[in-house]
Amino acid sequence: MAARKNAFYAQSGGVTAVINASAAGVIETARANKDRIGKVYAGRNGIIGALTEDLIDTGKESAAAIALLRFTPSGAFGSCRYKLKSLEANRREYERLIEVFRAHDIGYFFYNGGGDSADTCFKVSQLSESMGYPIQAIHVPKTVDNDLPVTDCCPGFGSVAKYVAVSALEASFDVRSMAKTSTKVFVLEVMGRHAGWIAAAGGLIGDHGIPVVVLFPEIPFDEKKFTDRVAALVQEHGFCTVVVSEGCHHPDGTFLAEQGSKDAFGHAQLGGAAPVVAGMVNRALKYKFHWAVADYLQRAARHIASKTDAKQAYEVGAAAVKLALEGHNAVMPTIERTSDTPYKYRIGMAKLADVANVEKFMPREFISDDGFGITEACKRYLRPLIQGEDYPKFKDGLPVFATLKNVAVARKLPAFELH
């Protein structure tokens, strides 16, 4: 039998309504395998917690607190946007990781995040070969953008899709009731830098009698074509809803919402596509409008999370531990759809070499011919992912969420400064 080792778990990138369900899946499954896994440490603020030896002892949390994570949004241990460079470019950080893992007898590394996190996890998985320390690195998929390859969907996406569809529908009913003498166009901006999966979810409201225009990153923006479409819908229905992805861009590639700054991963800092689009409508058509940016609300909305999504988030966390115990390294549990109706899936496995730094975009067959809506194929894909409600318990009118103690593990190494 393999030697008993401790595990390290960390959350990375933008958090979701269900990432903590994956954390619960990892921790509860590890606790059920105490003969193989000793302590489960969490990184405070993601991989930064490993580099600075700021570890949390999840063993100090009760079983009830860990179970409550399944209903708690955000990152219970803190997340970060910090991308490790290549081993050649920054050997210092990798050597530090090895020092921390060795000092705390860590043999399992579970990194819960999106594409950049998959890249980090893949790099860490190479440590055993290049630096002589055995570490099994398993990526736990998470991203509201739904842009990881290989897997059918990403935990976190189903809940944000449900929130966007519900919110767009509710707001559209509001606009419809006021359109005769007031607002005729409502613009909702949603996340999605390069992939329009979240915006596509807004297209589902078309089946409820709502005239809707969806603006995807995959389709270069044409202002004249767009305003003509809005005008036609308002003339026919009296109002119109527009769902615009933050990554919507002009034909030359510049984002409608680009601010000229970069985030920690080097991506263009976005924010403000909704007012830009609303301004176009106002200038061209003189319609009264309102706009909103879903922003953190869409990814934090645990109260209306998809039951399917919450279940899958837990399952990939549990599967990550099982894959590690089976001896796998540099892999990620995946969701493999086997049927649309009835919806069926199984948990599979992908090599991180096939996942890291690869983005999955909306297939063209999911976008209507005019570029402003979704097709029946897209609806068949989306509908199962937003099914079911998994409400948290409420007390005094508010949901009950977990607040962990997050007890720090005693440091054993000298301090480490991040560059």
Image (cartoon, grey):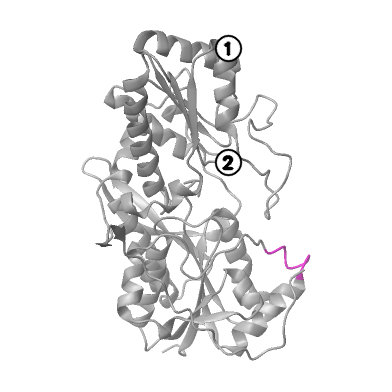
The picture quadrant where one finds residue 35 is bottom left
Q: Amino acid at mark 1?
A: Ala
Using the image as rendered, state which of residue 94 and residue 25 is in the foreground: 25
- Quarter in which the N terminus is drawn: bottom left
- Where are the magenta residues, as a range? 84-90
Cα distance in 3D space between marks 1 and 2 = 26 Å
Can the viewer see residue 413 in this picture?
A: yes
Residue at x 38% of width, y 73% of height: 322
Left or right side of 304 for 114? right
Magenta region's main secondary structure? loop
The disc placed on residue 284 is 1
Q: Mark 2: which secondary structure?
A: loop
In the rendered image, the quadrant that contains the C terminus is bottom right
Residue 401, percent from left and from top: 35, 65
The picture places residue 156, in percent across and down from the top left corner, at: 42, 52
Q: Up-down: is 406 above or below 5?
A: above
Q: How many marks?
A: 2
